[in-house]
């Protein structure tokens, strides 16, 4: 940016930031805020001139000038170091260009105008003060220019400065989008001079450096149009001192073993180098090694460390602690341990296993080879340890199918591996392979006649197996798939670096024209929608869909090209890096390749910008579709609401209420979906270059305005309130759905939020909220429906974590409290079910199992393939009313195709992030009981009661006065003639007419389950135990193998028991009489 020239500076001399005017040092600037004119008489009615001494007999004192100018161009700040004895802004004044001297507003001083200021145009000095006979000081001026920010926006400043004076380092957090150290530059002169950052943290040197002088920012990038970023400025000084020194490792050892051996034990040459750890640095990754005397340092990956394939001079091989070795800690590079004192030597190593193309696989602890990883590779060298060839083992196949697919992945981070052709493989399998370490035999090509390898015919399509120089025609023999990778000829690389640049330029030109057309189309559609605001928008959906189809076609093409260009540029970067240390390649060629690649990368940035533009366009069309659909749905909902309000007939009111619920639900779904749609659009739009898309952003603003006018959740709540009131109006008008018309599943009925019947076809969206279990018309058991049933959805709750602000079943504001407060389905006694009640919902019979009926409970998603077929399957649990301990609660799940039978478990009441646990509530009418004495008369004496009569069901139940195992446990028996059995007990009670009843019987399983949950105040001594376990109650229901069904009244589980004394355990009974 051109700077304005201040001609007055030609007459000035700047020394270390201090402006020397050549005027009388004691005289202030004529334009100072404190002017003085010694020839002008003093006016006693005016304030005393601060620059004129109060006591003319004393000499004027001139303070030192402020020092260390700090220029912050990005924030338009100018700072300095206080003058001696003047540590406050009240002592200073500032002059900007040709303006008057004014008091500073702080240190640093905030410049009022973001403008261009040349060097020397900003001055700061200590003010004069007549009361202390102090004159003005010399002025400190800016030594770096300021630029006006009228161009493109600059990157933000780095953040989180981390300064270590002991290590002389300055660190920072990278700016988003600028993740490479080379994207940054630094200044040690307060912003006057800038150098590219090479290492992070920045080593500033062991010098005295004032606060504010060290600065770091994103550097300018002309190719991408990025201006230099805002600067992060140091707030503390660096002081010179003694640097930290990291000791060298000790005990050098070269791990080449059995050198010279021909037989066993085999000679092993790994060129491994080992050492003893430096204190506090006890991992391989804390070290680096060199094999050329310290010119190049490489990362250590194991100890021992393979240091290369040549017979290195021991004085050139060394290891040290690397700089900043431990994460979040800073240290200088350590002292070097060279291999000079090691007893062994280094040798040429013909084969090396590799982790990446330039990083060897770590050796084993004993210094032996470790095979390459599945995505690793091997390098084979010649007898001099030179001319590397890359090989990758990709598995073995007995048939042609799938051979080439095995080479598709990258090995050692390199793509494009190829099989040898027939001629090459034939020759290779005839070469003596004794030099290949035994650890690698399986993974490289050998001359063994027992090994075969796939190779390509000259047509580059046909594959054959080659073994020891001959074709292997045995179809059942497996052959190894071994790929080769090689750097192309130099001429090919140069040509490719030119070609890829030309190709990307052509793509940019083509797609830029397509983007201009697409951008215009988007603007047109948005304007059309905006123009129709308040009217039906559905006719515009076809335009949006056409735009989306067209945009998707272009974007898909861009995606394919993007992947290809990434691969080509990546290979060029790889080739360039590999050639860097290749002395056989002329430097001018290396530079040419780099220059061409840099130009191609600059074009690629333009290409990616177009890719981003079309990606943004693909986020616009879903937003437009959602806008149109939600707008029209809202219009339809308002129409339905009007019809409902106007309706007077009960049936019509009811039908319109369901329609309004449905419309509100649809709008709610749109609103939820729009959260992601609009967020995606905003994120994509933020990536779009604003300066090139002004008209498009203007259209986006219209789109935002229209989205702001869409209905909200509050509007949905208002519609639901009207619909709910409509159902009440319909009921008040005498309309009701017949019970027979509300049936769903085997024996359930649909209910609305008022507890009234709904037609069987009614959906959850239309206001269906509960079901009633018709098997027990006395209790009228109601069940709530889940709202969505999704993992991490609104039904996925903790048991009791409301105090931590976590949605819970219990506690203040929890599911139970809110459901009872709302009187959902006309009930206010909702609670958690027992395990037995959950089991009672298993009414759907599949060919292999019984589970909950999803037609009755529509948001139970456990049977959906995305949850059930996935491995591992997602289990959907429900909270029960049973506590295991003070901090654990039992949960229950239903069987599915791929999960075990229904079961219980327990988890923390605070919830378990690894489990999906829902809250489903139950409500039922509590049954009443009358206590009877042995004659059948009603009594209030609990001890005298021997029966309990239930008026609603007209059933009388036997009571017991103890839980004694010896008297309570009986076997069922084969007939009433079997003494001391349950059947004999039935005959006896009928004979004696217990409670004046003569039709006592053993209850069925269903009848016995009617007592659950047990009323402990009526049915005392219900639990009878043996060895600490509760005994079950036998029922009249037959089971397999001549057994009877038995119900555990505590766990609510069932089992099968024998009728007579056998190996099955004991059980108890309770008889029943029905009026």
Image (cartoon, grey):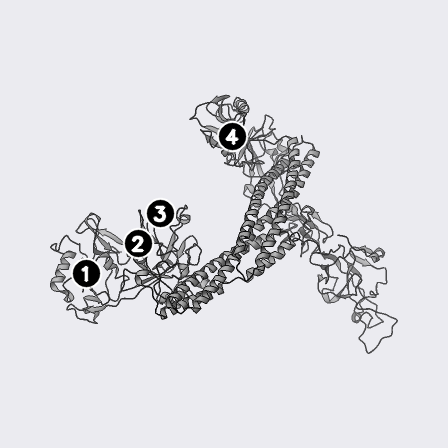
Q: How crowded is the residue under tag 4: few (<14 C-alpha within 10 Å), some, or many (20+)?
A: many
Image quadrant of residue 524?
bottom right
> In the image, which disc is placed on residue 265?
none
**Please, what secondary structure does the residue beneath circle 2 have?**
loop
Q: Residues within 10 Å of mark 2 (few under 14, many from 20)?
A: some
Residue 869: give x, y in percent of width and height: 40, 46
Which residue is disc 2 drawn over? 843
Closer to us: mark 1 or mark 3?
3
- Residue 153 position, x and y percent, is 67, 54
Quick check: can you spot residue 266?
no
Say which residue label 4 marks: 482
Q: Secondary structure at mark 3?
A: loop
Query: What residue did someone put label 1 on?
Result: 1071
Up/down of 517 relative to 92, above or below? above
Which element is circle 4 on?
A: strand
Q: CA distance from mark 3 to mark 4?
A: 43 Å
Q: CA distance from mark 4 to mark 1?
A: 80 Å
> Gap in Å between the C-alphas at discs 2 and 1?
27 Å
The residue under label 3 is 897
Mark 3 or mark 2, which has the lower sequence index? 2
Q: Is residue 387 left or right of residue 720?
A: right
Along the line of sight, the residue nearer the viewer: 1044 or 638: 638
State which quarter of the image contains the C terminus. bottom left
Indicate the position of residue 984 as horizontal and vertical percent values: 13, 57
Instruction: Tell me how far mark 1 sits from mark 3, CA to CA.
Output: 39 Å
Q: Earlier in the sequence, mark 1 or mark 3?
A: 3
Mark 1 surroundings within 10 Å by alpha-carbon count, few (fewer than 14), some (14 through 19), many (20 or more): many
- Looking at the image, which is closer to me, 154 or 209? 154
């Amino acid at each position: 940016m051109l700077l304005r020239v201040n001609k007055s500076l030609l007459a000035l001399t700047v020394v270390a930031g201090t402006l020397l005017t050549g005027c009388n040092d004691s005289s202030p600037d004529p334009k100072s805020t404190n002017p003085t004119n010694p020839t002008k008489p003093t006016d006693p009615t005016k304030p005393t001139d601060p620059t004129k001494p109060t006591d003319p007999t004393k000499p004027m004192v001139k303070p030192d000038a402020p020092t260390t100018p700090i220029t912050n161009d990005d924030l338009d700040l100018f700072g300095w170091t206080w003058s001696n004895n003047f540590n406050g802004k009240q002592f200073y004044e500032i002059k900007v260009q040709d303006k008057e001297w004014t008091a500073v507003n702080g240190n640093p001083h905030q410049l009022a105008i973001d403008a261009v200021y040349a060097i020397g145009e900003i001055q700061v000095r200590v003010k004069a003060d007549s009361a202390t006979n102090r004159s003005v000081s010399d002025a400190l001026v800016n030594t770096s220019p300021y630029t006006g920010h009228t161009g493109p926006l600059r990157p933000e400043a780095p953040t989180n400065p981390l300064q270590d004076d002991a290590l002389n380092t300055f660190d920072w957090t990278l700016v988003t989008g600028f993740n490479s150290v080379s994207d940054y530059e630094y200044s040690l002169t307060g912003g006057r001079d800038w150098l590219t950052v090479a290492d992070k943290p920045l080593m500033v040197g062991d010098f005295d450096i004032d606060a504010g002088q060290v600065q770091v920012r994103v550097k300018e990038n002309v190719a991408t149009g990025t201006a230099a970023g805002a600067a992060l400025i140091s707030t503390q000084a660096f002081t010179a001192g003694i640097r930290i020194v990291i000791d060298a490792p000790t005990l050098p050892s070269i791990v080449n073993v059995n050198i010279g051996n021909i037989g066993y034990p085999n000679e092993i040459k790994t060129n491994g180098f080992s050492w003893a750890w430096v204190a506090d640095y006890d991992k391989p990754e804390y070290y680096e090694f060199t094999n050329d005397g310290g010119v190049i340092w490489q990362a250590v990956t194991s100890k021992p460390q393979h240091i290369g394939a040549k017979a290195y001079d021991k004085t050139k091989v060394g290891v040290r602690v690397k700089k900043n070795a431990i994460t979040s800690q800073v240290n200088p590079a350590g002292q070097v341990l060279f291999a000079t004192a090691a007893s062994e030597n280094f040798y040429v190593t013909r084969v090396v296993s590799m982790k990446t193309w330039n990083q060897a696989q770590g050796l084993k602890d004993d210094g032996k080879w470790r095979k390459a990883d599945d995505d690793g590779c091997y390098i084979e060298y010649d007898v001099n340890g030179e001319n590397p060839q890359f090989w990758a083992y990709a598995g073995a196949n007995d048939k042609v199918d799938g051979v080439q697919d095995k080479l598709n992945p990258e090995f050692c981070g390199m793509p494009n591996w190829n099989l040898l052709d027939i001629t090459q493989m034939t020759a290779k399998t005839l070469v003596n392979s004794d030099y290949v370490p035994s650890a690698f035999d399986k993974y490289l090509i050998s001359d063994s006649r027992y090994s075969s390898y796939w190779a390509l015919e000259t047509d580059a399509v046909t594959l054959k197996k080659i073994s020891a120089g001959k074709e292997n025609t045995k179809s059942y023999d497996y052959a190894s798939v071994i790929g080769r990778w090689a750097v192309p000829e130099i001429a090919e690389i140069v040509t490719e670096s030119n070609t890829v640049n030309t190709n990307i330029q052509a793509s940019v030109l083509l797609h830029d024209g397509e983007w201009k057309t697409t951008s215009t189309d988007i603007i047109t559609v948005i304007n059309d929608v905006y123009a129709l605001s308040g009217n039906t928008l559905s006719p515009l959906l076809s335009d949006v869909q056409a735009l989306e189809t067209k945009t998707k076609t272009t974007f898909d093409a861009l995606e394919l090209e993007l992947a290809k260009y990434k691969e080509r540029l990546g290979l060029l970067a790889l080739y360039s890096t590999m050639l860097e240390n290749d002395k056989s390649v002329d430097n001018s060629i290396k530079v040419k390749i780099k220059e061409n690649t840099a130009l191609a990368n600059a074009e690629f940035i333009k290409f990616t910008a177009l890719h981003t533009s079309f990606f943004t366009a693909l986020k616009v069309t879903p937003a437009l579709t959602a806008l149109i659909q939600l707008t029209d749905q809202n219009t339809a909902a308002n129409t339905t609401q009007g019809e409902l309000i106007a309706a007077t007939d009960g049936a019509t009111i009811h039908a319109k209420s369901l329609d309004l619920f449905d419309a509100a639900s649809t709008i709610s779904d749109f609103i939820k979906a729009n959260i992601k749609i609009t967020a995606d659009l905003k994120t994509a739009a933020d990536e779009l270059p604003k300066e090139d898309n002004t008209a498009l952003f203007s259209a986006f603003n219209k789109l935002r305005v229209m989205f702001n006018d869409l209905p909200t959740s509050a509007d949905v709540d208002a519609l639901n309130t009207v619909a709910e009131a409509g159902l009440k109006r319909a009921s008040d008008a005498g309309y009701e759905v017949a019970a027979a018309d509300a049936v769903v599943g085997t024996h359930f009925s649909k209910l609305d939020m008022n507890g009234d019947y709904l037609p069987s076809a009614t959906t959850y969206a239309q206001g269906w909220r509960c079901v009633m279990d018709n098997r027990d018309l006395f209790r009228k058991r109601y069940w709530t429906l889940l709202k969505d049933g999704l993992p991490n959805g609104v039904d996925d709750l903790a048991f009791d974590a409301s105090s931590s602000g976590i949605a819970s079943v219990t506690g203040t504001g929890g599911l139970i409290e809110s459901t009872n407060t709302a009187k959902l389905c006309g009930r206010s006694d909702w609670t958690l079910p027992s395990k037995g009640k959950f089991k009672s919902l298993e009414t759907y019979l599949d060919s292999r199992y019984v589970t909950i009926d999803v037609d009755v409970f529509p948001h139970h998603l456990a049977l959906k393939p995305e949850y059930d077929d996935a491995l591992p399957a997602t289990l959907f649990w429900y909270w029960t009313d049973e506590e295991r301990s003070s901090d654990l609660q039992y949960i229950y799940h239903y069987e599915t195709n791929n999960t075990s039978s229904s079961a219980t478990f327990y988890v923390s009441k605070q919830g378990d992030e690894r489990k999906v646990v829902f809250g489903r509530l139950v409500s039922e009418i509590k049954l009443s009981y009358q206590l009877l004495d042995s004659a059948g008369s009603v009594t209030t004496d609990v001890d005298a009661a021997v029966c309990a009569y239930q008026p609603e069901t007209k059933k009388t139940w036997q009571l017991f006065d103890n839980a004694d195992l010896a008297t309570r446990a009986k076997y069922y028996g084969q007939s009433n003639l079997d003494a001391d059995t349950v059947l004999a007990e039935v005959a006896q009670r009928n004979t004696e007419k217990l409670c004046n009843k003569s039709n006592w019987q053993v209850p069925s399983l269903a009848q016995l389950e009617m007592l659950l949950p047990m009323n402990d105040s009526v049915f005392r001594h219900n639990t009878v135990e043996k060895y600490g376990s509760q005994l079950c109650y036998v029922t009249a229901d037959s089971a397999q193998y001549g057994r009877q069904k038995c119900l555990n009244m505590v766990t609510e589980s069932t089992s099968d028991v024998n009728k007579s004394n056998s190996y099955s355990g004991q059980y108890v009974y309770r008889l029943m009489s029905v009026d």
